Image (cartoon, rainbow, N blue to C red):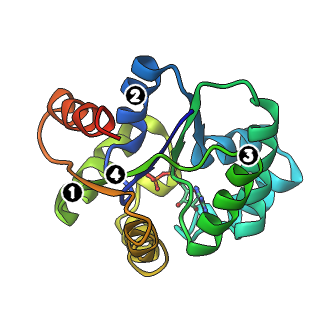
């Protein structure tokens, strides 16, 4: 099983690159952002709670996202592997993921860390906001909040995966195809 963690700040291109990797390696895409947005669209209690954090650019509580991932893993027991996009985002989530994968004896194969300069992130998110309709992409102060949350709570995960020898840095500037090739080169030696 190939289990990839796609890691990087908001706007790093995780969703775009996930599409390439899914097709190439026939993986199941698990994006906590997408899962949360579908809960919001369905107006569930969970969606309503998540929305109050997401609209301000804060992380949703760990228990909510861990539970969502747990049920998706159970639903897809026969998968070739998974691509985790936007999850884990805290050390607590990473520990929970390791435990869940341990139960199936299929550890994280590698963490692919997309590195992009801050101004480029802001430009990409604002430009996506014009078409995505996402409220969190349309306001610079919310975007700044998301980047701050990333720096404070998510960046420490690099050390977590580095300690397991699983952290692979990928230069995330350039064309979509160039970045996809860098990812594929890395995955091919995992
Ligand atoms: P981006 O990577 O561009 O921020 P996402 O769709 O991954 O976009 O996330 C959007 C929002 O959803 C985040 O700002 C956060 O509020 C929430 N979210 C997504 N994944 C997680 C997670 N693993 N833990 C906590 N909150 C999350």
Measure the C-alpha gap from mark 3 to mark 4. Answer: 21 Å
Label for residue 116? 1
Q: Residue furthest front?
A: 105
Label for residue 40? 3
In the rendered image, the vertical position of residue 162 relative to residue 2, given as above or below: below
Give yes or no for contact between labels 1 and 4 (Cβ–Cβ under 8 Å). yes
Q: Residue furthest left?
A: 174
What residue appears at the point 70 percent right and 53 percent down from the top-left corner? 102
Which image quarter is the N terminus in?
A: top right
Picture coordinates of residue 67 (x, y %)? 80, 55
In the rendered image, the vertical position of residue 15 relative to residue 171, given as above or below: above
Give yes or no for contact between labels 1 and 3 (Cβ–Cβ under 8 Å). no
Which residue has dot 2 on it?
A: 21
What residue appears at the point 22 percent right and 65 percent down from the top-left corner? 118
Picture coordinates of residue 66 (x, y %)? 73, 58
Which residue has dot 4 on it?
A: 11
- Tell me which label, 1 or 2, sits earlier in the chain: 2
Q: Is mark 4 within 8 Å of ligand 1?
A: yes
User: Which label sits in the foreground, 1 or 2?
Assistant: 2
- Tell me which label, 3 or 2, sits earlier in the chain: 2
Give yes or no for contact between labels 3 and 2 (Cβ–Cβ under 8 Å). no
Measure the C-alpha gap from mark 1 to mark 4. Answer: 8 Å
Indicate the quadrant where residue 50 lies.
bottom right
Which residue is nearer to you in this view: 22 or 129? 22
């Amino acid at each position: 099983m190939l289990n990839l963690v796609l890691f990087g700040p908001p706007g790093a291109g995780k969703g775009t690159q996930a599409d390439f990797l899914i097709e190439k390696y026939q993986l199941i895409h698990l994006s906590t952002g997408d899962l949360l947005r579908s809960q919001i669209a369905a107006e569930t209690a969970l969606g309503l709670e998540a929305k109050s954090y997401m609209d301000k650019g804060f992380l949703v509580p760990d228990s909510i996202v861990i539970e969502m991932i747990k049920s998706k893993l159970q639903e897809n027991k026969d998968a070739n592997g998974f691509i985790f996009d936007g999850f884990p985002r805290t050390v607590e989530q990473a520990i929970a993921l390791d435990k869940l994968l341990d139960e199936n004896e299929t550890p994280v194969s590698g963490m692919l860390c997309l590195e992009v300069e801050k101004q480029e992130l802001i430009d990409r998110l604002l430009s996506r906001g014009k078409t995505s309709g996402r409220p969190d992409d349309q306001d610079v102060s919310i975007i700044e909040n998301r980047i701050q949350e990333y720096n404070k709570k998510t960046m420490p995960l690099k050390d977590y995966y580095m300690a397991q020898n699983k952290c692979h840095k990928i230069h995330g500037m350039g064309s979509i195809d160039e970045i996809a090739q860098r990812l594929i080169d890395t995955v091919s030696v995992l």
